[in-house]
Amino acid sequence: MRKSRSSATAIRDPLSFWSKRSRWRWVEGSRTRSWSKRRRANAVFLQEKLASTNLASMKRIVVALAGNPNSGKSSLFNMLTGAHQHVANYPGVTVEKKQGYLKYKDHEIEVVDLPGTYSLTAYSVEELIARRFILEEKPDVVVDVVDASNIERNLYLGTQLIEMDPPLIFAFNMADLAQRRGLVFDLEQLSRLLGARIVPTVGNKGEGRIPLLDAILETARESRKPRTHTVRYGGEIEEELARIEAAVAQGEKDLAARYGARWVAVKLLEQDDEIVAQVRQREVHDLVQKSTQHLRGIFRDEPEIVMADRRYGFISGACQETIENSVERRHDVSDVIDAVVTNRLLGLPIFLLLMYIVFWATFALGEYPMLGLEWLFGRLGTAVAGLWPPGSDSWLRSLLVEGVIAGVGGVVVFLPNILLLFLAIALLEDTG
């Protein structure tokens, strides 16, 4: 009887039975969902915690990219940083400041693309910006991007960087172009002569990225080690540099601590206006003037010019020892051309002749496309004006014919002259 009563009860109240089971299932489901939400929240929290810990433990490295214009510096910058870039202007000037960021082997690397310069004198805004950044911001590593197909011209900037004594790497960019020209480098020997690592790269193809990043990390770790490598200028100049260096180290201690006494001595002997203005001790000025007059009497030329020749001599000797191919023949031809175009008597007339040729080509050759563009815009204006009846004074007709077409045409007709002018300037710059 009990069994049948229980069965009858179950049959009489089936909804009660299923409602209890449903409530139980709902509660169990809620518990399951609650646990899964907690697990997901904990996982997200742990990931964020680990990410923040990794960022905090990352070492930050600032890398400055220096180099000549057209050395492939921008392509190397893009190869290193990819899309993680920021472009602004340096304070007070219109020169672009490009910064990029990347992470590599537990290091956060900031890459600063310095303005392209041929030297680090204080003659132009770009040179001044690049020099001040290296001297005052003191990046952990400076990478000198060198056109491997034109080593001798590009390494002049490298000799000045060696004198500034930052942690330095040479990136021999466009290595594929140098290889096609048959140039073979003894990179190990050249690295010893320059006192810095050399990494072959091809920026526009992404080749050499990992070796360059590894070299950056190794150089940054070694940045605290003292470096004694520098460019030597010969007995007479070195004697005067030693006297000036000692005077700077003793009388201009702040300047020596900020820039290095040797580099300050070199710049004072070169009559660098920015460094000369920072020297306060009269004794140092008098010593520099005395040394300058002494060297003028020996070399019959300004110390700055003699020191530039010695830098090129250092570069030429290093290249002859470490580069194999027809470099010597090309070097001889280049020397002959340089001797003519930089001659004291012939240099200015040759320069004026080249400027006249550029001026003539800009207007004489540009006249034909200018006439063609004038004819084209004239026909276009006539065709558009023909859409209205003769004698119509419609404002829309005047706007299109006399405003838009005539205005744009008046500007576009000068485009051939501008293109020819920039082409001529690019040829002059690329040929040196």
Image (tube, helix red, strand yellow):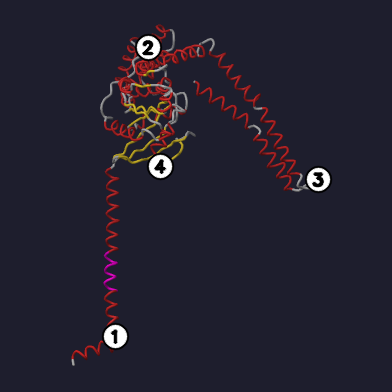
Residue type at the position of mark 4? His
Front position among marks 2 and 1: 1
Percent x, y of residue 135: 36, 28
Circles 1 and 3 in contact, beta carbons < 8 Å: no
- Residue 58 appears in the figure: yes
Q: Which residue is mark 2?
A: 291
Q: Which residue is mark 1?
A: 14
Circles 4 and 1 in contact, beta carbons < 8 Å: no
Percent x, y of residue 338: 48, 14
- Circle 2 SS class: helix
Question: Upstream in the sequence, badge 4 or badge 1?
Answer: 1
From which residue to which does the magenta span run? 26-35
Residue at 42% x, 18% y: name it.
271
Residue type at the position of mark 3? Pro
Disc 4 to disc 3, how far (Cα)? 59 Å
Main SS class of the magenta portion in the image = helix
Residue 319 on the magenta span:
no
Question: Which label is found at residue 390?
Answer: 3
